[in-house]
Amino acid sequence: MRNRAVIAAYSGIDLDEKQAEMLWQSIETESRRPRRAETTEIPMPGGKGRRLARTLLLAAALTALLTAGAFAAEFFGAKSVIIPQSVGEQQFGHLDDEGNIVEEDSENSAALSMTTVYEGTEEVMDWQERAAAAMEEWEAYRRPRLEALRESDSAEYQRVQSTMGSFGDYPYFYGVWDDEGAAKLREIADNHGLKLRVLRENRIKMEGDSDEAMMEALSSQVCDGRLCTADLRVDHYMVYETGAFQLSADVKQPDGRRLAFYLCTTAYDEMISDYTVGGLVVQDFTDLVTRTYTAVDGTELTVMQNDHQAFAFAYLDDYYLTMSMNISAWRDELPAPGMTAEQINAITEKDFSLDEEAVNAALDAFCFSAIGKGGAA
Amino acid sequence: MPSTLSRTRRDMREIYQDHLKTVYRIAFTYMKNTYDAEDAVQETFVRLIRSETGFADREHEKAWLIVTVSNVCKDMLKSRKRTEVSLDEQSGLPAPASEPNAVLEAILALPDLYKTAVYLFYCEGYTAREIAAMLGEKPNTVMTHIRRARGLLKKSLGGDFHA
């Protein structure tokens, strides 16, 4: 028996349709009842009674989110966009074809940020410096307030925990939780001549949504004409007030595999940090081959690629563009409710090799030069 | 402009359908019986409905549910101060499928500390780093938990478990 036995064992834990429906009905009924007290007093080690929020780990997660320099970022974003804190030794674990854990240490791991520019023109680097200074100032204001709130252990802190750092249309990497903080954040951004990355639309593909309609809706907001000429399978997109956007999608390859990508643009005057959108984790940056590529629309991109990952970036007129790429775990058939572990395994991609041709073809499908031209941007 | 992150009740049902299996499986590994697992699932989704939480994307949404259901379960276990019920006494165990329940029993017997990470690693395909980000742990801590859990599974299952 291999570790697949573990997966198979979990697959036996399931509710049938009737049970699931009954449970949903009870959830709906319960959610309409008046709220109960949200916390429970539980004595903690050390003899000091402490209010134990029901979400201890949530607090840990929130702390990670709200702590600049920690994971922050869109850390729950697309799986390929989770970032390490820095370049350095990291431990990687993954499952091999037999389902066994393979652990590897890498002294050369790195994260390629999707919003941070490593080299650029004087104007671009000036923006990066102002953004970094603004984020530092914001953190200096926000952290003590959060600490005081945490110490108060109040209902407000419980509310903040439950929002996971999201407040209104402010993305959670800012860690805003009230109007006072939001006003301060705006003030800091203004003082540094920056704009906030405030969400205009977050659209996750739902049943009934067509890829074409989603791409049309995105294109109409961020560019002149069509953003992409290829038929994409869209997962989600986000558009910000600055006209910046993020797109998670994949495109079918001639051999049936699908190339998944995460595309991100950042306006040159946005208040962002290294961790705003995360980055592409590269286990060993020494095997990345860097080249330049001029896409069909004339945009020159820098491409960094190994045999299974690629990261491209370009300086557009008004936006810094990044795009991470890898082969999707799924071809046309996606996992569906009710599938067994064996069925899911059967449709899971086995070949994740990525060559230059596939990357170039994906880049050629985009009209990068149209980004920021026309539309609602 | 209203927040596009706000959810309608119809959206909630879709979220429920999308993530029920994951949330239920995690709940079951903690609670070890159908009834308490369903309570934990109910509490988790009720919190979601009542909260004003907005999500950046589907992974964010899923991660919130995973973290929340794990905490709900731990809280239920602590607050009830319940004595562990032996597997034989439980009526809510899923019926054996093609695999004997020895593996499931071994999984359920793992320390709570390891359960969420083990499930996410083996069944959801998350890397240690992703799990660490989700749970607010260090990646090496997560790997240690998975490694120890694997050792316990090996010990429980003897020669049947090769990892």
Image (cartoon, helix red, strand yellow):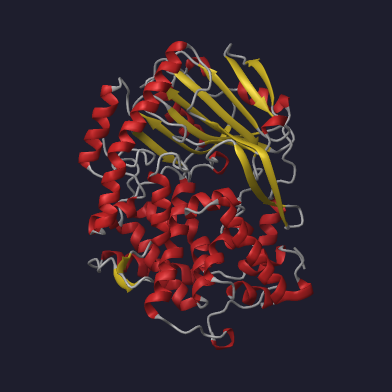
Please tell me how many numbered marks the rendered image carries: 0
Residue A169 rendering spot, x and y as whole percentages? 31, 38
Residue at the far bottom in the pictured view = B89
Quarter holding the C terminus of chain A? top left
Q: Is residue B99 visible?
A: no
Picture layout, residue B154 above or below residue A339: below
Asked if A102 appears above or below B30 in the picture, the reply is above
Judge from the rendering whether residue B150 lies leftward or rightward of residue B35; answer left or right.
right
Q: Residue at x 59, y 17 (%)?
A: A301
Q: Quadrant of residue A290?
A: top right
Q: Position of residue A264 (x, y in %)?
A: 49, 29
Question: A177 and A226: which one is in front?
Answer: A177
Q: Is residue A192 visible?
A: yes
Residue at (58% x, 13% y) in the render = A297
**Residue A67 occupies quadrant:** top left
Task: Residue lying at the far front in this picture: please name it.
Answer: A46
Q: Nearer the viewer, residue A244 or A43?
A: A43
Name the residue located 64 percent from the left edge and 41 percent from the top edge: A328
Instruction: Indicate the quadrant containing the N terminus of chain A: top left, top right, bottom left or bottom right.
Output: bottom right
Whether residue B103 sits left or right of residue B65 in the image: it is right
Q: Where is residue B98 drawn, in percent x and y? A: 71, 73
- Residue in the picture at 29% in, 54% down: A150
Q: Is residue A72 left or right of residue A6?
A: left
Residue sitting farthest toward the right: B159
Picture coordinates of residue A99, whole percent (x, y) = 72, 57
Up-down relation of residue B23 to residue A203 (above or below):
below
